[in-house]
Amino acid sequence: MPDSRVPRRRRFLVCEPRHFAVQYAINPWMSTGRPVDVIRALDQWQALVDAYRAHGHTVHTVQPVSGLPDMVFAANSAVVVEGRVFGSRFHAPERRPESVPYAAWFKTEGFEVHPSEAVCEGEGDLVPAGRWILAGTGFRTTREAHREAQEYFGVPVISLTLVDPYFYHLDTALFVLDDGSGGTPGTAGNVAYYPGAFSPGSREVLERLYPDAVIATREDALAFGLNSVSDGRHVFISPGARGLADRLAVLGYVPVPVDLSEFHKAGGGIKCCTQEIREIRS
Ligand code: ARG
């Protein structure tokens, strides 16, 4: 089993944390009384970029904009499936202007951007998982945005209700380990998640879709262990989520610890800092 996990090369978009700060509080992790060490954040972020490149992934960067301290959380900017870009409309007024520089980046790269009409925070809540898109709602992205995304992508969108304010985005409570395109083509793949972040009905949906899911503890989730990025083999994961990393290793995944503790102060981690550009596969 350990060698059966096949990585797939990814294309990521990230944003340097030059202007990163906690200047407002829009989730329970944020406190303006807990300043960010920008030098440390820059080092941690560079280590993430280096880790992606060392594992064969392509990393693009968008220029950070002064006055947009959360722009580092690139995952929130859009959802990209088969080269189609569904642009975000942020919940918090403080973050709304981020849509402009991100849309400009996509256009420069030759993508058309379809902006969401309803509140939608990109891959923070819309998590492409191979044959379908898992979609969180409850705190940020609305059900109306789920419907819009399904219509735009023509891919089934499965709505899941989040109930714990600490896990306000789906990508803080669940990540895709394998999207079915790697070692197990044509299958639903697999995910890891923390059940306590979901409503009872949504938990049941996840149990039906993923009977073999890796179940994480609240401790793993609070350590941002579910805000991980997997390429199907390597799992870029917060070093605080030891229990989860150990379980993944037993299952044949290779945990690659990357510490983004400065970003936890804003309620974000590895996945939040990473937008995946999924293009049409031949
Ligand atoms: N401070 C940001 C916010 O609350 C953090 C975003 C984290 N991003 C994510 N994909 N979960 O909007």
Image (cartoon, rainbow, N blue to C red):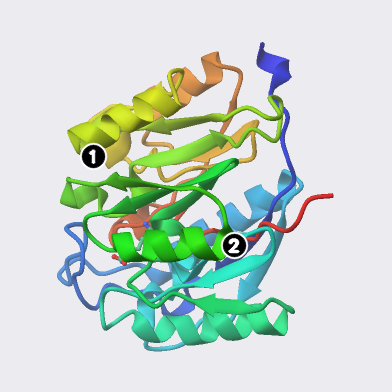
**Label 2 element class:** strand
* Image coordinates for residue 35, horizontal then vertical, percent: 25, 69
Quadrant location of residue 223? top left
* Image coordinates for residue 34, horizontal then vertical, percent: 20, 65
Quadrant location of residue 242? top left
Quadrant location of residue 253? top right
The answer for how far apart the CA atoms under marks 1 and 2 are is 25 Å
> Most extreme residue toward the top, as rendered?
1
Instruction: Give amino acid for label 2.
Output: Val
**Label 1 element class:** helix
Q: Which mark is residue 197?
A: 1
Residue mark closest to the camera, 1 vs 2: 2
All told, the count of numbered labels is 2
x 20%, y 38%: residue? 199
Taking 246 as reference, is 269 above or below it? Answer: below
Q: Is tag 1's residue or tag 2's residue first in the polypeptide sequence?
A: 2
Whether residue 93 is visible to the viewer of this picture, yes or no, is yes
